[in-house]
Amino acid sequence: MTIGRRLAAIAFHLCVGALLVAGCRPAQAGDERVITQIEPIAGKTGLVVRFILTGKTAVRSFALKNPDRIAVDFDDAVPAVPFDTLPDNPLVETVRHGMVTADRYRVIFKLKAPAVATIDRTAEDGKEVVEVDIAATGDAGRAAEPVPAGRVTAAKPSGDAPPTPGKGGGPRRLVIVIDPGHGGEDQGALSPSGTMEKTINLANAKMLRDILDTYPNVDAELTRNDDTFIPLDERAAIARKLGADLFLSIHADSIHYKSLRGATVYTLSEDASDELARQIAANENASDRFAPEGLTDKSPEVFDILLDLTRRETVSFSEHFAAALVADLSAHKVDLINRPKRSAGFRVLKSPDVPSVLVEMGFLSNTADEKLLKNEDWRRKITSAIAESIIRFFRGGKADALKAAQKND
């Protein structure tokens, strides 16, 4: 997806409540459908939310765990109205929404109690109406299981939804860009025994790529395939050029706290969440001291504008993915540091339109972590857990990354 198309989608979102006002028109919006109304209606046993769109689009619902949530995805759709509050109801606590990728709008309902979602589609006055009915599990006349990703239950269909693009009629093509930190003359951290971070990062990134490539319609790409130096801004630019759904930067830093060990997941923030996050960000941002003079100063005003325009959607979904990844790593028995989800001003995460996170798989300054980072079985364990988390986040349901990885063995 082009940045122009992404900005067209954002233009719709910024024109909240003013879609019909002169001058509030997206340029080159492509085939996006516009959500012109969102109507939440509370009942005694659940919540019904009506989405009114300018045209038909693919819609899917799926369950998310830890905490329990229901997600609803609209392909090629953008919102033109706010959706931040809900009426009092017995099942849904809060709602979050935004563009999870350049061509997908996601609404996430955080549940108070176990529930399932049923999707009903109708046509009214030439508009497409998608009604999401959230009901308690096992309610009479309702589905007993959540609607899995890629399938829509339609009690009163208004016609077939547009097919989701993908090879062989499968799920939509997913592009994941993996960034092995450092490279070339920038060796990154160095362990007491001489292990270089740039080497560890590249090996782990390649393993993660190979596991992701076993899934249907998933293209995993690396920002570097060998021992090459790439400036931080260029790494993010590669993700945008490839139309990435997710940018994942892989690292294994060193810190003066020798006893500190375990994985950490970082997101972008103007202010560091704590002193450790500030130090790690400073270490990673220092990579550009190896860049040619003037390279990082190109078009700063354009970069700032793009970042401001997309901050709400991109950062929101980066945070959501980071939280899900931490939960999945913990479920796979991967050691994590205390408060494993942190944030700081990482330059490599400042892509204007691609959800981005940085994963520190461990610390080369810790002897135990260094052994794990060089161990084939442990590396497969953590990269498989990350791959599974990515697939689960974007497609819902259970992704068995370990079995997928074993197919290549």
Image (cartoon, helix red, strand yellow):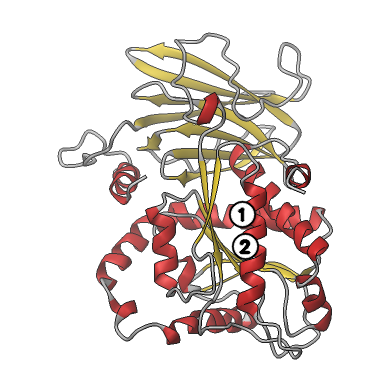
Image height check: is 297 above or below 334?
A: below
Q: Is residue 191 visible?
A: yes
Furthest-left residue in this view: 22
Using a 10 Å C-alpha cutoff, classify the residue at mark 1 as few (fewer than 14 neighbours), some (14 to 19) or many (20 or more): many
Is label 2 in a helix, a strand or a loop? helix
Relative depth, front residue between 200 and 157:
200
Q: Is residue 266 left or right of residue 31?
A: right
- Which quadrant of the structure image shows residue 378? bottom right
Kind of residue indicated by mark 2: Ala
Residue drawn at x 36%, y 62% is 307
How many marks the image carries: the answer is: 2
Mark 2–mark 1 distance (CA, rounded to whole Å): 6 Å
Q: Quadrant of the N terminus?
A: top left
Q: Give the quarter of the image for residue 227.
A: bottom right
Picture residue at 60% right of the left edge, 29% below the top:
61
Asked whether residue 49 is in view, the answer is: no
- Disc 1 marks which residue? 209
Q: Which residue is mark 2?
A: 205
In the rendered structure, are the residues bearing label 2 and label 1 in contact, judged by CB atoms less than 8 Å apart? yes
Instruction: Classify residue 376 as left or right of residue 389.
Output: right
Residue 338 in the image, given as x and y percentages of width and height:
76, 72
Seen from the viewer's position, the closer of residues 14 and 314 is 314
Tell me the crowding category of disc 2: few under 14, some 14 to 19, or many 20 or more residues within 10 angstroms, Cα based. Answer: many
Point 36% across, 22% down: residue = 55
Disc 1 element? helix
Q: Amino acid at mark 1?
A: Arg
Residue 371 % position (x, y): 82, 76
Is 43 placed left or right of 127 in the picture? right
Image vertical order of residue 253 relative to residue 207, above or below: below
Q: Position of residue 95 (x, y in %)?
A: 56, 42
The residue at 29%/44% (across/down) is 8
Residue 311 higher or lower than 112, as above or below? below
